[in-house]
């Protein structure tokens, strides 16, 4: 029935895949399919765009040695992320199960390897990741209240714990509520980044593009090295982290893949690959042009001296509206916590 928490598949669903996608034998219990294309894009974009784009530009620029190479690294990292996401889309239609890495490791290498992967993720990877994002959220929420000193540690921890508890309750209460929260906060962080990009374009129209001219963009202040470029890619990869999270909720996607005659999952089509095709190029575009905007308002030295690039950017170009940037980072990280809880709980 529509109101029941789980929904049952029809008995004629077959082994590989009736509409529910949950049981292997048809007639098993499956999660309700409540995630459409828009929410699927929201999960990918919301998990990728956390605090990284507001903080990582410093690390990428520092290890690249010049503005031009840093922008190329951002674009190339997006391309590598797109390749990884497409590989995951292939896995998602080949092994149409929720659980992401755990489901694939268990299916390919057996129960022991799957259990070890899940054990490490549940006890180490996911809790620490969510704690870091929640603490970042708390830090940026309290930043306007303590502009001249760091926020008190107990306040940070209490606010981070409150954030985790609230979003855990939302995710336990309703899948629909959790996806709505994700959609709203994803839209909010995209609007904040649109403000940064729009301000950067306005700066360019004013003639503030000194560091974007080829002669200056590729003016190295330190000799580039393979190790430095590798570290720049690593910093950029942190900002793109979360591209694989849609595969954690494959069974809850509406039309995740296209059917071919015989009831098997076909390659191409479906909301799983579509969401990836939409989201990864969108995030890459936003990241590259956000970094372009940063260097229209700050010199490389100013950017490297900043611990919160977006906040410094806001202080330099937004004037009395500078408070928008800490709020934007807070909204971004709040949505990141929700996305992490939503996907990792699967």
Image (tube, rainbow, N blue to C red):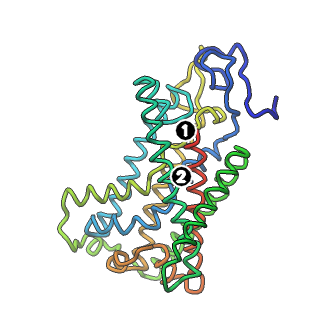
Residue holding disc 1: 248
Question: Can see residue 194?
Answer: no
Closer to the chain start, of discs 1 and 2, is 2
Whether the residues at callouts 1 and 2 have beta carbons within 8 Å, the answer is no
Helix, strand or loop under label 1: helix
Residue drawn 32% across the image and 64% down it? 70
Say few, some or many: other residues with alpha carbon within 10 Å of mark 1 (under 14 / 14 to 19 / 20 or more).
many
Please identify the quarter of the rendering in which residue 208 is found: bottom left
- Foreground residue among 305 and 285: 305
Q: Position of residue 86 (x, y in %)?
A: 45, 38
Residue drawn 43% across the image and 62% down it? 288
Residue 314 is marked as none
Residue holding disc 2: 47
Q: Specify whether 120 is left or right of 254.
A: left
- Foreground residue among 79 and 57: 57
Q: Specify whether 196 is left or right of 252.
A: left
């Amino acid at each position: 029935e529509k109101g029941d928490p789980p929904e049952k598949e029809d008995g004629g669903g077959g082994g590989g895949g009736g509409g529910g996608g949950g049981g292997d034998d048809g007639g098993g219990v499956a999660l309700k399919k409540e995630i459409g294309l828009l929410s699927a894009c929201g999960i990918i974009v919301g998990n990728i765009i956390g605090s990284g784009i507001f903080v990582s530009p410093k690390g990428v620029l520092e290890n690249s040695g010049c503005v031009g190479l840093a922008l190329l690294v951002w674009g190339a990292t997006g391309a590598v992320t797109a390749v990884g996401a497409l590989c995951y889309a292939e896995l998602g239609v080949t092994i149409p199960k929720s659980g992401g890495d755990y489901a694939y490791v268990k299916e390919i290498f057996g129960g022991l390897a799957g259990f070890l992967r899940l054990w490490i993720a549940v006890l180490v990877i996911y809790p620490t990741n969510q704690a870091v994002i929640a603490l970042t959220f708390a830090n940026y929420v309290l930043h306007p209240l303590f502009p001249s000193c760091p926020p008190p540690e107990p306040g940070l921890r209490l606010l981070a714990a409150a954030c985790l508890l609230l979003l855990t309750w939302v995710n336990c209460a309703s899948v629909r509520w959790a996806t709505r929260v994700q959609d709203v906060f994803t839209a909010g962080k995209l609007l904040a980044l649109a403000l940064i990009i729009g301000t950067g374009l306005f700066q360019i129209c004013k003639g503030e593009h000194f560091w974007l001219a080829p002669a200056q963009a590729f003016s190295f202040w330190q000799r580039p090295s393979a190790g430095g470029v590798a570290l720049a890619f690593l910093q950029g990869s942190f900002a793109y982290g979360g591209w694989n999270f849609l595969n954690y909720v494959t069974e809850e996607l509406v039309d995740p893949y296209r059917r071919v005659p015989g009831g098997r999952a076909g390659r191409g089509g479906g909301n799983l690959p579509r969401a990836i095709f939409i989201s990864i190029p969108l995030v890459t575009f936003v990241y590259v042009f956000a970094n372009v905007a940063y260097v229209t308002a700050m010199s490389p030295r100013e950017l490297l001296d900043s611990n919160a690039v977006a906040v410094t950017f806001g202080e330099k170009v937004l004037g009395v509206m500078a408070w928008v940037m800490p709020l934007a980072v807070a909204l971004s990280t709040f949505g990141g916590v929700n996305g992490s809880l939503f996907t990792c709980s699967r």
